Each structure stands twice: as C-alpha cells, then as structure tokens.
Image (cartoon, rainbow, N blue to C red):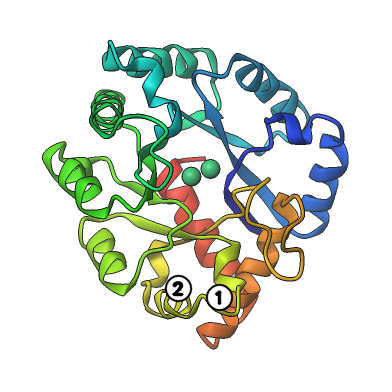
C-alpha cells in the first residue's frame, strides 16, 4: 500500500480521464492520495466531490498558494477566511495547504506572500490542523515565519522537498516531515539523493505533485498518482531497503500526520 501525499488531480488536466487515472493508481498499489485544492479556485473545489465520489480514500488539503497571494494584497486575512469557508464545505479536508513562499517565480510581492502565509498558519493553529508547505528559494524567511508563528505546535510537511541536507535538518528539527517527489529519481539530483538517505524513516512521505514533475522514465509527460511507486522504489534503492518498507513507513507517517 502506497499513499501519494501531494497531487492536484482535481485540476483540469485530469477532468477528461479521471476514472483511468484512478484505476492505474489502484493497480499500482496506491491506496489513497492527498489532493491539494486551491481555495481561490471554485472549479477545482467543485471537482473535488467528483474525485472523492470515484476514490473514497482520497483526502484533501486546502490553501492559498503563494502564486495566488497577490489576490489578497489589500486584505491578507481574507485568504485565511476563504480557506476556512472551503474547509467548512469539504468534510474530507485534513490540512491547510499548500501554503508558503515562492521567491523563484515571485508572482506576488514577497511581503504579501509572507502575510498570506502567516494568516493561514494562524488559521491552522485555530483549527488544530497540520500544514502543507511550498517553499522555493525562500528558506530563511520560511523558517523565520514558521518559528514566529509557532508552527511546530501543528506540524506538517515540506512538500516536494528539494533543499540540501542542512535545510532537511532544520525542517526535521522543528518537527516537520519531508515529502520527496519524482525529482529524487533524476540522475543529477545528487544532493537530494543524500537527503533521501538521511531523513529519519518516521518523517518521510512520498508524492507525485501530479500533473507536474513526472519521475524517470516518464519525465516530461503529465504525471499521475500511479507514478509514486517509482519514487518509493528509488528511495528504497538509495536506503538499501525494500520498496514495501518505504511504502509501509510513509503510509503510517501519512495517517499519523493527517488523521484518516
Ligand atoms: Zn508546491
Ligand atoms: Zn503542489
């Protein structure tokens, strides 16, 4: 049994062949998936019920992505209220996210990204739910905000972790989990392979981030939850263990963190 801890299968990329995507996932041993929903995307929030009707083991995480933070520039608190309303309307929601900072694309001003991130951590504190963090080229600000907002009390995961061993250590030290995606299968991702070897087994998750980031040998195509099996296999090789052991540990971690 495997769990894809982060995918976007309620998005338009999957509307045409959702049944086949779910069948392929189940055939690959993927028992459930954590489907990320954007609180500011009404079609995606509505499509979530189509997904859960076909795959009752999915769970949802809802947040305002840093790319969309600019919509809330005049009132960052509204981002958290929007997430709160979406959570109230979705009984299978289990976490707040993905939320965070993206200084690679800088689609929204950095101060706005930070405020929107803070407001959503505060919501997670009030609701006592874990968070799913997206951070890119913003390590120091991410850790500063997580510390100032006492995010260790709620915990969560650094999704699609691509940092180095130092950053992995910092994330583990504040009680967070690390989720590895298909990037770990890329031959040149040497530092990330080191991270895959060092993460304590009880803090590791695996994901696809579908439709993005297809693993080798599917690179460049639309990614889908079935491919999380390849991520688990590569991590197992790096750690000299079996894919079954990685599947079992990451599934237990998922259930402990996000409550079935
Ligand atoms: Zn992300
Ligand atoms: Zn994502």
Q: Tag 1's secondary structure?
A: helix
Of 233 and 8, nearer the camera is 8
Q: Quadrant of the N terminus?
A: bottom right
| Whole-percent x, y for residue 126 in the image | 25, 23
The residue at which mark 1 appears reads as 235
| Whole-percent x, y for residue 193 in the image | 48, 78
Using the rendered view, name the quadrant where residue 27 is placed.
bottom right
Residue lying at 31% horizontally and 54% vertically, measured from the top left? 176
Residue 153 visible in image:
yes
Q: Tag 2's secondary structure?
A: helix
Residue 96 visible in image:
no
The residue at which mark 2 appears reads as 192
| Whole-percent x, y for residue 19 in the image | 86, 37
| Whole-percent x, y for residue 186 in the image | 60, 73
Q: Earlier in the sequence, mark 2 or mark 1?
A: 2
208 w.r.t. 57: above or below? below
157 w.r.t. 180: above or below? above
């Amino acid at each position: 049994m495997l769990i894809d801890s982060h995918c976007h299968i309620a998005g338009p990329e999957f509307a045409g062949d959702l049944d086949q995507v779910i069948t392929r996932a189940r055939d690959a041993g993927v028992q459930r998936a954590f489907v990320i929903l954007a609180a500011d995307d009404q079609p995606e929030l509505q499509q979530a019920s189509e997904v859960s009707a076909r795959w009752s083991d999915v769970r949802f995480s809802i947040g305002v992505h840093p790319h969309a933070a600019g919509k809330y520039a005049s009132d960052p608190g509204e981002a958290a209220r929007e997430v709160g309303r979406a959570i109230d309307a979705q009984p299978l929601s289990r976490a707040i996210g993905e939320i965070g900072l993206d200084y690679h694309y800088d689609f929204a001003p950095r101060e706005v990204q930070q405020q929107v991130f803070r407001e959503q951590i505060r919501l997670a504190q009030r609701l006592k739910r874990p968070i799913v963090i997206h951070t890119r080229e913003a390590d120091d600000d991410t850790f500063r905000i997580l510390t100032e907002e006492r995010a260790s009390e709620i915990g969560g995961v650094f999704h699609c972790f691509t940092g180095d061993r130092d950053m992995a250590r910092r994330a583990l030290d504040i009680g967070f989990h690390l989720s590895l995606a298909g990037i770990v299968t890329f031959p040149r991702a040497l530092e990330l392979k080191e991270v895959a070897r060092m993460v304590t087994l009880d803090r590791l998750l695996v994901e696809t981030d579908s439709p993005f980031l297809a693993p080798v040998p599917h690179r460049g195509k639309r990614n889908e939850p079935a491919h999380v099996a390849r991520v688990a296999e590569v991590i197992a090789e790096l750690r000299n263990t079996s894919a079954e052991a990685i599947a079992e540990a990451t599934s237990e971690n998922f259930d402990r963190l996000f409550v079935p």
